Image (tube, grey):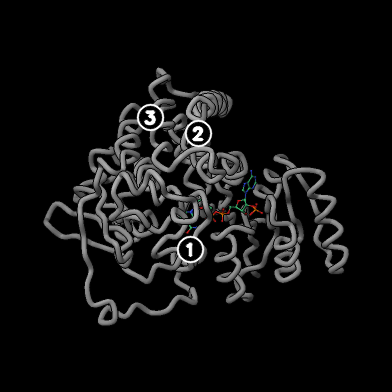
């Protein structure tokens, strides 16, 4: 019997890598549902190649177009649309594994649906956990779901921690250390970053990723989001989570133990490794990733992150320490600002300004329901939007 998989965000970078790993192991995995948003032709092709039972898109017009494409290809995929359909394909009784790889806040509801339905959930969509940390983890604890981190840093830490840590015994570990590549602007001055273009921000030196996470890597907000992600995934206070810039992206993260040992996970920078790890866990399968050749790499280097040039790091530490809905506001403001930058409405360094100014307009409280999280998220988006309008003027 194969394990049946729903890939939320199949047309994205993580989705494509996931399907590549799955395709190498037809005896282990089959595709149940694939979801996408704008790339309908790509989604139709994926449905044909992987024999998907269902495809889900966001609206009726996209569903009509996809239905025509599916009919032309003479495949049996049933096309659905809307948030309810996303929830259903994430929770269907026939599904064993859900890859949560929709980008941004849009991924929260279907990911929670998979958790409530006790699935093995592979979490790439860090924004879902950042925006709704407490209720996300409460849902997880109430369920029989198994959450496995796909973000390469968190997957690395998960591999380096003793299993007792995840069960609440944190003795022996002194800190978690997140690696950061430093992104494409690692050695740029503030002045250079002021006039950086979306193309330059998306040209990551080591990873090929979607545009939103690429911009987050360039601003280092990605590391800030990962700090909050790690705080929840590993139930670790933020003052025991550090960051180190390691430009080669070979060491994906490290765990420091109280006896002086440091355990790190290494590998070529290729998301198929954490994806394969999550899919097969606790077993191991071939991911198709080239073996690491340390002699070819020859040198690994490290430096402190520059918090002055990359103010998003401190904004994230601030939001994480403030708690409550501060990370929800941080995440929403960042999503709005990154979108505005990608659409050339604001400059690169204004992303941090929008986030800082939005945070300053809120007094934070703990959201006790999904609706409360969504309310804070929407409110922060409205504030950020209006700030961006003022910047332009
Ligand atoms: P992409 O932008 O490449 O893909 C995003 C996916 O989400 C696409 O399938 C897209 O559909 C879909 N999508 C976008 N908006 C919506 C929406 N409103 N409703 C439903 N679906 C939507 O992103 P990545 O694959 O790079 O990243 C996905 C997630 O994984 C992010 O949260 C990112 O932070 C995380 N991640 C990514 C890594 C990477 O290496 N790429 C590494 C670690 C984490 P379509 O393309 O059809 O419009």
Residues tagged 2 and 1 counted as in contact (Cβ below 8 A):
no
Circle 3 residue: 356
Taking 286 as reference, is 75 above or below it? above
Q: Secondary structure at mark 1?
A: loop
Q: Answer yes or no: disc 2 within 8 Å of ligand 1.
A: no
The residue pinned by badge 1 equals: 208
The answer for how far apart the CA atoms under marks 2 and 3 are is 12 Å
Would you place residue 302 above or below residue 366 in this image? below
**Disc 2 + disc 3, Cβ < 8 Å:** no
Between discs 2 and 3, the one toward the N terminus: 2
Q: Secondary structure at mark 2?
A: helix
Res 239 → quadrant: top left
Of residue 29 and residue 240, the one placed in the foreground of this image is: 240
* Nearer mark to the viewer, of 2 and 3: 3
Horizontal and vertical percent for residue 67? Answer: 84, 56
Residue at the image position 48 percent from the left and 24 percent from the top: 367
Residue 131 place in picture, x, y as percent: 48, 35
User: Which dot marks residue 387?
Assistant: none
Answer with the quarter of the image where residue 7 lies: bottom right
Mark 3, secondary structure of its residue: helix
Does the beta carbon of the residue at mark 1 sit less than 8 Å from ligand 1?
yes
Q: Residues within 10 Å of mark 2 (few under 14, many from 20)?
A: many
Does residue 65 appear to the left or right of 197 in the view shown? right
**Cα distance in 3D space between marks 2 and 1:** 24 Å
Where 385 falls versus 268 (above or below)?
Answer: above
Q: Identify which residue, 358 or 64, lies in the foreground.
A: 358
> Mark 2 — residue?
332
Residue furthest to the left in view is: 259
- Which image quarter: residue 235? top left
Label 1 vs 3, first from the N-terminus: 1
Q: CA distance from mark 1 to mark 3?
A: 28 Å
- Disc with the residue nearer the chain's start (2 vs 1): 1
């Amino acid at each position: 019997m194969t394990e049946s998989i729903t890939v939320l965000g199949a047309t994205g970078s993580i989705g494509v890598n996931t399907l590549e790993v799955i395709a190498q192991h037809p005896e282990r995995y089959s595709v149940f549902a694939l979801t996408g948003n704008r790339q309908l032709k790509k989604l139709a092709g994926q449905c044909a190649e992987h024999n998907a039972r269902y495809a889900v898109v966001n609206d009726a017009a996209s569903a009509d177009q996809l239905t025509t494409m599916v009919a032309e290809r003479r495949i049996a995929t049933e096309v659905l649309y809307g948030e309810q359909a996303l929830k259903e394909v994430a929770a269907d009784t026939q599904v064993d594994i859900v890859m949560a790889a929709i980008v941004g806040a849009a991924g929260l509801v279907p990911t929670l649906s998979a958790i409530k339905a006790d699935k093995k959930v592979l979490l790439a969509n860090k924004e879902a956990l950042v925006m709704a940390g407490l209720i996300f983890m409460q849902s997880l604890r109430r369920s029989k779901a198994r959450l496995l981190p796909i973000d390469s840093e968190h997957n690395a830490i998960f591999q380096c921690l003793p299993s007792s840590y995840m069960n609440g015994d944190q003795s022996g570990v002194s800190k978690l250390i997140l690696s950061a590549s430093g992104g494409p602007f690692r050695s740029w001055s503030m002045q250079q970053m002021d006039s950086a273009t979306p193309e330059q921000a998306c040209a990551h030196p080591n990873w090929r990723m979607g545009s939103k996470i690429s911009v987050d890597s360039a601003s280092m907000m990605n590391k800030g989001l990962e700090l909050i992600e790690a705080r929840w995934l590993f139930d670790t206070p933020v003052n025991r989570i550090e960051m180190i810039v390691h430009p080669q992206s070979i060491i994906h993260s490290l765990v420091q133990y109280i006896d002086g040992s440091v355990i790190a996970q290494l590998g070529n920078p290729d998301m198929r490794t954490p994806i394969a790890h999550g899919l097969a866990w606790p077993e191991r399968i071939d991911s198709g990733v080239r073996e690491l050749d340390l002699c070819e790499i020859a040198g690994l280097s490290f430096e402190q992150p520059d918090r002055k040039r990359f103010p998003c790091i401190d904004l994230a530490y601030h939001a994480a320490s403030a708690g409550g809905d501060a990370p929800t506001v941080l995440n929403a403001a960042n999503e709005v600002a990154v979108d505005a930058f990608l659409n050339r409405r604001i400059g690169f360094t204004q992303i941090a300004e929008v986030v800082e100014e939005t945070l300053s307009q809120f007094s934070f409280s703990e959201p006790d329901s999904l609706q409360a999280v969504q309310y804070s998220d929407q409110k922060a988006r409205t504030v950020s939007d209006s700030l961006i309008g003022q910047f332009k003027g």
